[in-house]
Image (cartoon, rainbow, N blue to C red):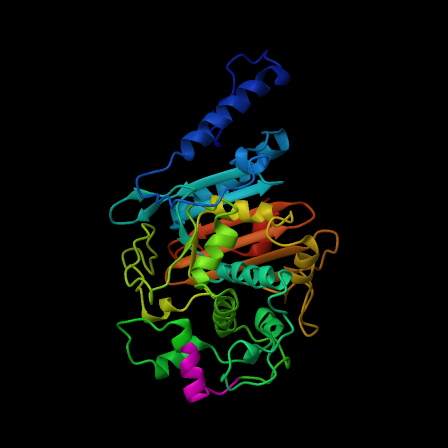
Amino acid sequence: MTKSGRFMPHDTHMTLSSIKPILRTVAFILLAALLAPPACVRYQSSGGQAEPDDPYFANFPIYAELTPERAEITDNLSTYFERMNRAGFNGTVLFAENGEIVFAKAYGYCNLQQKDSLSLESSFQLASVSKPITALAVLILEEEKKLSVDDTITRYLPGLPYEGITIRHLLSHRSGLPNYMYFCEDYWTDKEGAVSNEEMIHLMIRHSPKRYYLPDRRYNYSNTNYALLASIVERVSEMPFETFVKKRIFEPLQMKNAMIYNKAAQPSNDNPVLGYVSSRLVAENNFLNGVVGDKGVYASAFDLLKLDQALYTDKLVSQETLKKAFEPQHKDLRPNDNYGLGWRLDVSDELNPVVYHTGWWKGFRTYFIRELSEKRTIIILSNTLKASRFNTRELRELF
């Protein structure tokens, strides 16, 4: 047996072509065993269905053929993440090419005390990886001509004391608005409860917290932008943000373990995957978890792979719209570290642009990386902070 766990024949006279089917069969058996869902997996019913003639969703998950080149890649990935696991990494890892899984494995536990094992269907708080999903909700409404990204936000949020800001400024982090996580600490008194998106807006109207910059002056990453976008989606669609995203994104893509947690609507969070700020300390479910759009989405590695593949089609929005979302919005930023409409961008290689997002919130750290031309996908979801910080370029090099 090799160090990666693949069995080699004892008969050294067997040819490579004769053992390839054996290798392939054994690899699939091992992968199937790894993906067996443990007791802590929560399944959510999904009313929406993908089109019955869609072969990708009908056959999901699909595993890539174990070629010699991919065998070397999986060996490297296995060695790397086993080492990270020994250092404390706890989470799920998925590498795919053309939607076919090359490497996928769950390491560790949903609950470190109860030792309930994670699986690739375990649902993690995505933190800022929620932002591409919020941006997608906005773009769906634009394609339906219910809004324009160049509309001023006061058209939908009247009374907000900040003029000249457009939806595009929110999407690209050029609004100059202060971060709600700071001014809510100052102005929100019920720290045992939860501040909601609407209550955050009322605080902005009442107290007019000082903006950092004038609109479109410069790039300034602010979670307030995406909280306001979620509120705009609610007002335009006339339904809660969570409901809109469920009906228009999660259900059509059969993202069956995806949900949005909003503490203002549901005080307790019953998701079995807990976030840890240390090896024993569970992260606090604090009052800021009532604000969604900038965070709040829970999803599994499998859910994100389904989303990844849908974004190569017109299933949710057109490719023309997505192309605009992947265009750099900042002349003052470098091509390898820019931001579009909901996505971080590395367009330094014009032949293989990379769109991605990372996230951190209350014990969770997440990575969603998409190499567009090569159609390679990297998904890492962790529920502990130890050994969970990765360099996105190094991850791509591993692949």
Asked where in the image residue 66 lies, by quadrant, the reply is top right
Instruction: Name the residue located 40 percent from the left edge and 69 percent from the top edge.
Output: 291
**Magenta part, dominant SS:** helix
The answer to which quarter of the image holds residue 197 is bottom left
State whether residue 265 appears in this view: yes
Taking the image as shown, residue 156 lies to the left or right of residue 322, namely: left
Outermost residue, right side: 351
Above or below, 106 relative to 13? below
**Residue at coordinates 60% horizontally, 69% vertically from top-left?**
147
Q: Is residue 272 left or right of residue 202?
A: left
Report if residue 309 lies within the magenta region: no
What range of the chain is rendered magenta?
Answer: 200-211
Marks counted in the figure total 0
Q: Considering the image in quadrants, where does the C terminus appear?
A: top right
Q: Position of residue 206 (x, y in %)?
A: 41, 87
State the residue at coordinates (50%, 59%). 129
**Residue 387 showing in the rendered view:** no
Q: In the rendering, at what x and y percent does residue 53 appear? A: 59, 34
Q: Nearer the viewer, residue 158 or 181?
A: 158
Q: Position of residue 203 (x, y in %)?
A: 40, 82
Q: Judge whether residue 204 is colored magenta.
A: yes
Q: Where is residue 200 drawn, in percent x and y? A: 41, 77
Q: Looking at the image, is 270 positioned above or below residue 152?
A: above
